[in-house]
Image: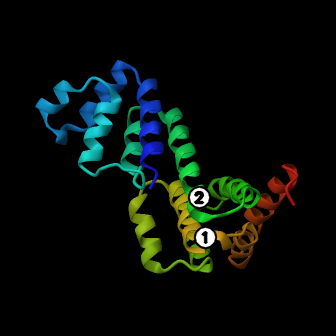
Amino acid sequence: MDTRGFRAMLLTISDKLTEDNVVSLKFLCLDIGKKRLEKINKGFDLFECLIERAQIGPDNTDLLRKLLNDIGQTVLLEIVEDYERQAARPADGLDAKEREKINIATDVIVEHLGKKWLQVGRKLGLQDTQLEAIQEKHSRDLEEQVRELIRQWMKIKKVNARVEDLIKALRDCKQNLTADLVEKKLRERGIP
């Protein structure tokens, strides 16, 4: 758990929020309580409240993502994604080359896979309960379901996660176009 990195990421996001953004965020977090919200005038203070209530944390950025999305600050989601990539690195032990390959493949797969992600998830060895949890967690966002699928697969495989396994699973599920696009993108980037 990278608490320092998490707080640094929240501070970076807070610095980029306008006063109007903070007002909008407070409106979305009314369950914190009116008196407490009146004292909050910085995004970071609001994030601290959400941490105290265990609504966000180093391993739980879902609400943060939703809030940024709801106030139209989708550009700040990149900061969250950078944090998550950094936080995932030491835990999975993947070398930089394989991580880069998987990141490239993930972007292509997220863009092209669509509703067949459940089938691919089973091929990758995820249990139905894990797949259902992903569906529930991101019920309205197909792309996030696919991204979460790959994250869960990487957690299971750890250092043994290989882009070749993703491509094989795609081909086994007759998702040859997506597999071809992954291979093409890797070649374009000069990665064998």
Q: Where is residue 43 in the image (x, y as percent from the top left)?
A: 34, 29
User: What amino acid does circle 2 point to?
Assistant: Pro
Where residue 46 appears, as percent x and y from the top left, is 28, 34
Q: In this view, does 37 lie to the left or right of 112?
A: left
Q: How many marks?
A: 2
Residue drawn 28% across the image and 43% down it: 50
Kindly identify the residue that appears in the image at 87 percent across and 55 percent down.
187
What x and y, as percent, mark residue 171? Answer: 74, 74
Residue under the point 19% across and 30% down: 37
For label 1, the residue is 158
**As drawn, 79 above or below 137:** above
Q: Which residue is nearer to you in this view: 65 or 44?
A: 44
| Colouring rule applied to residues | rainbow
Vertical placement of residue 185 versus 64, above or below: below
Q: In which quarter of the image is residue 97?
A: bottom right
User: Sequence-wise, which precedes: disc 2 or disc 1?
Assistant: 2
Tell me, for residue 90, which label it has, or none.
2
Q: Which quadrant does the C terminus fall into? A: bottom right
- In the displayed image of the protein, which residue is found farthest to the front? 4
Q: Would residue 73 be found to the left or right of residue 78 on screen?
A: left
Left or right of residue 126: residue 26: left
Q: Mark 2–mark 1 contact, CB under 8 Å?
A: no
Q: At x 58% / y 80%, what residue is drawn?
A: 125
Pointer 1 local density, CA inside 10 Å: few below 14, some 14–19, many at least 20: some
Secondary structure beneath dot 2 equals: helix
Mark 2 Cα within 10 Å, few/some/many (few <14, many 20+)?
few
Residue 72 appears in the rendering: no
The residue at the far left in this view is 35
Report the quarter where the N terminus lies: bottom left
What element does badge 1 sit on? helix
Image coordinates of residue 77 in percent, x first then y, are 50, 39
Asked whether the viewer can see residue 191, the reply is: yes
